[in-house]
Amino acid sequence: MKRSYAGKIFRKILVPVFHDVDYVDALNAALAIAGQANVWLVGIVGITENESLSKAAVPARHVRKMMREIVSEKRTRALQRIRVSYKPWDELTHVVQEEQPDLLVLQPSHFGAMGIGIGQAFRFPPCDIVVASGKFPDHPEKVLVSLRGGPYAELSLRLSLSISRNSQAKLTALHILPDTSASDPAFKGMESVLKNLPEIKRQHVRTNDPAQAILSALRDHDLLVLGATARPQDSLISIGPVADAILRESSKGVLVVKSSRPLPANMDSEIVGRNAISVLVDKWFAENTYHAGEFADLDHLLALKRKQNLTVSLALPALNEEETVGHVIQIVRQTLMDRVPLLDEVVLIDSNSTDRTRDIAVDLGVPVHIHQNVLPQFGARTGKGEALWKSLYLTRGDIILWIDTDIVNIHPRFVYGLLGPLILRPDLLFIKGFYRRPLKVDNKLQAGGGGRVTELTARPLLNLFYPELSGVVQPLSGEYGGRRAALEQLPFSSGYGVETGLLIDVFEKFGLNAIAQVDLQERVHHNQPLESLSKMSFAIIQTICRRIEKRYGINMLEDVNKSMKLIRYEQGRLFLDVEEIAELERPAMIELTEYRERNSKT
């Protein structure tokens, strides 16, 4: 079954409907943010303290009628039970606790019906909250989002991106810096996010009157999104003077947002705004995560490939894989070369196997290369990364794909799943596969037990140093590929660090949106012992440290750090053994004269 990869979006938005109170702007705002299926209506009837609640029966009937009409026209959803209360705001808060919406959307007329002010609602929000004021456009074309780096910037940006996605509106991010400030530390986290969102136009203004600056910029836009001023909960002013002035003076649609998340301890810290990284990652995850099943129509994929005049190479790295390599080659060639010619060449890049791996490949008609014998003038190194680097030299395709040859449950989807996004989207440069990895223990498969180095080393380090890549499900997966024009510009780690290094380097050089990932479902292979996994982790840590050194111009690792003490158990004794695990690196292939000359002849 095909999975849905939506990232973190607004799956449930709550809009209250009151008796004899306008609801149009709040409803239109909610629809623009989340779409029809995700908007839920809740009927609220308020009764004054000196009246019997039974008097709400008639107004409740009117509210039910209103909600049926809204659902019929707008295809929204409605909670069937109408809530009657002496304290409508408290009742609405209870509904929020029960329904757990992502967002509560109100408009100024609602507060009068509830007998409270906007400030009170913003002071103790039951969930993330939005107030829609002014006439909300039916189809906003230009949206302005004010991002001052405060704690509600993340919600403002997320909401703006959602409106843009649903209405195709153009976004402008307005950053206001006081005249007296040389810098804005709180905005740095948000600034790093905006650099990875090129579709958002950026505007910077220095002023000591932010409200007027925002109103001036709003003249060229249909809609404004901004956060309330961050205030402690015990403050009597919970919406802030800027938002208050804009709500009073603007004739355009305005959405004021406040997150229910507690305020950070240090409001001036650079940490403020960095939570917006999650907006970037969630957006990338939603837009750039695919499922192999989307590309199962191989004839359609072939037509797209031919239309773009693309050639595709599959390189198979191998080391002592005689049990599986033959089946891998047969399945791939039968389906993706003989039946539907999506692949233009398949080559085996062997790491000097001592079993029958090479013989099996030769018998099946696949060109075989021992990577230690390729480009001998540069020396012979061991390691999978070395094989992948030299596969650039040995292949000819515009797109190069790699899959491991130890896959027990090989299926053509491992290849066409990777190829599909690259053919579908010319802007993508790099594709990673991911899958469920059962772990075999005592001849039994444990679902989801694999990927130990991924979860214990790679993903934590990427989250720490490269949070933009935190949405990559399996950064160490051996099934991946990309466009030659990009891959030939990147250095390759010679060993276990190759997957991590390529992922980081593609991000650093080409940006997050150049990367995509695809669900290849389940992968069964032979799991490695803990000692091997420990050495793999050591090499990956070296690779990430080297990237950090390049980014910040510092030296973290000395040569002495490249050896690892391994704990050995042998015949009842415990001792230490030292093994050299130096993660060496090859230069970008395009820098080699031999490569340029070889390519110029083809």
Image (cartoon, rainbow, N blue to C red):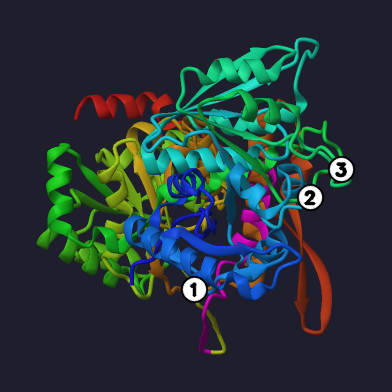
- Which residues fall within the magenta stretch? 443-468
Q: Do the residues labelled 2 and 1 touch (CB within 8 Å)?
A: no
Identified by mark 2, the residue type is Pro
Q: Which residue is drawn at 39% across and 44% down?
A: 166
Report the front residue among 357 and 102: 102
Circle 3 sits on which residue?
A: 265
Which quadrant is the N terminus positioned in? bottom left
Relative placement, left or right, of 568 versus 250 is right
Q: Does the magenta stretch include residue 146?
A: no
Lower position in the chain sequence, tag 1 or tag 3:
1
Q: Which residue is tagged 2?
A: 262
Q: Does the magenta stretch include residue 456?
A: yes
Q: Which residue is drawn at 27% across and 72% down?
A: 327
- Give, as a three-letter code, the residue at label 1: Gln
Q: Is residue 548 rendered to the left or right of residue 144?
A: right
Which mark's residue is nearer the viewer, 1 or 3?
A: 1
Q: Do the residues labelled 1 and 3 touch (CB within 8 Å)?
A: no
Q: Which of 136 and 177 is in front in this view?
A: 136
Residue 136 at least partly seen: yes
Q: Mark 1 points at which residue?
A: 80
51 and 236: which one is in front?
51
**Residue 116 vertical placement versus 567 (above, below):** above
Q: Report the number of discs.
A: 3
Identify the mark nearer the N-term, 2 or 1.
1
Considering the numbered disc 3 on the image, is that residue within a helix, a strand or a loop?
loop
Q: In which quarter of the image is residue 32?
A: top left
Check whether the beta carbons of the residues at disc 2 and disc 3 lie within 8 A of each other. no
Q: Is mark 1 on a helix, strand or loop?
A: loop
Residue 337, horizontal then vertical, whole percent: 15, 57
Q: Can residue 341 be seen in this view?
A: no
| Circle 1 crowding by C-alpha within 10 Å: few under 14, some 14–19, many from 20 | few
